[in-house]
Image (cartoon, grey):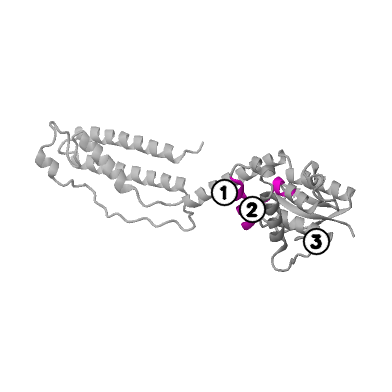
Amino acid sequence: MEETMEQIQARHRKEQRDLVARITNKKKNATKKTRKGVNDECAELERQLKERQAEEVARAMGHVEEPQDEAVEEDISRQMQDVGIKDGEGAASTPPTASQQQEPRQRDTQQPQQPQQPQQGGKKRNRQKERLARRAAEVEAAAAKAEEEAKNMTDHRGLERKYMAEVFAAHDLVEKDIQPDGHCLFSAVADQLQHRDIPLRGEGGDEKDEPAYRIVRKAATEWMAGRPDDYAPFLEEPLDAYLAKMRDTAEWGGQLELAALAARYGVEIRVVQDGRTDKIEPPGGVAEQTATIWLAYYRHGFGLGEHYNSLRKKA
């Protein structure tokens, strides 16, 4: 079984401690006559251990690292000092004095450290690339999970389109696309009225001085302003503030505005939406019903939210 880098490093530390114990024992038992031979032998043991450990680290990393001899040597020397042994000395009967501690350590063999050159063809580990690869794998897994969840979700847009298509076919209707700009309800109503030759301003009105949707906006708000008791109870703000916003901005229109427009123009408005078709009739006695206009109302079909299109009869 191949060792991990953490396992290799742990084994190297144990080997260093064992070597320190061996060197310590050898130097403690050395005499004046054998001391030089013991020192040479200990230096050779240190060199062999450092070279072997450096080679093992290089193989594990997939390339030759910068030499670790100095770090290993320092570690061994430090551990030897902890037990009272200095290079070239025998057993210490007493701990080293302060003057001895300040002496520079002399090594029996001082060889200049030559930086090892990376082996030709060796491949250096790219940790940043590994992190990017892990991140890419996480993103891919999240996308796969989202796709799987999407398969189990209700396709509201598809169901809405399916119902719309069935109603369009049953009533011979075709869609007239309206710009999704906040004025879509009023633009769709204006298209329906103009398609049926119903004047937007009433008899004799000039409709060329401003956009059709703005004329219809004003028609709705003027109708509501003249009948506050019919509309104010349905609002959560003062009627005057609401009507100013509805008249002068791109505020979305809704059910109240449809009811006001049905009454103002004397038409029945049919709104085709997901699962049903709503009918909005003018109040009795306001005006004679002259036409039925059709709108398509989408909750899910457009990215900006709710939207109205105009529905015309097939030519």
Whole-number angstrom distance, CA of label 3 to CA of label 2: 22 Å
Vertical relation: 26 (above or below) 279: above
Magenta residues (range): 238-258
Q: Position of residue 196 (x, y in %)?
A: 84, 59
Q: Residue at x 82, y 52 (%)?
A: 293
Residue identified by numbered label 1: 136
Q: How far apart in space, not on screen, are marks 3 and 1 (Cα)?
A: 56 Å
Give me the disc on residue 194: 3
Residue 125 visible from this viewpoint: no
Is residue 246 within the magenta segment?
Answer: yes
Dot 2 corresponds to which residue? 246
Secondary structure under the numbered disc 3 in the rendered image: helix
Observer-side mark, 3 or 1, equals 3
Q: Quadrant of the C terminus?
A: bottom right
Q: Earlier in the sequence, mark 3 or mark 1?
A: 1
Q: Is residue 263 above or below residue 199?
A: above
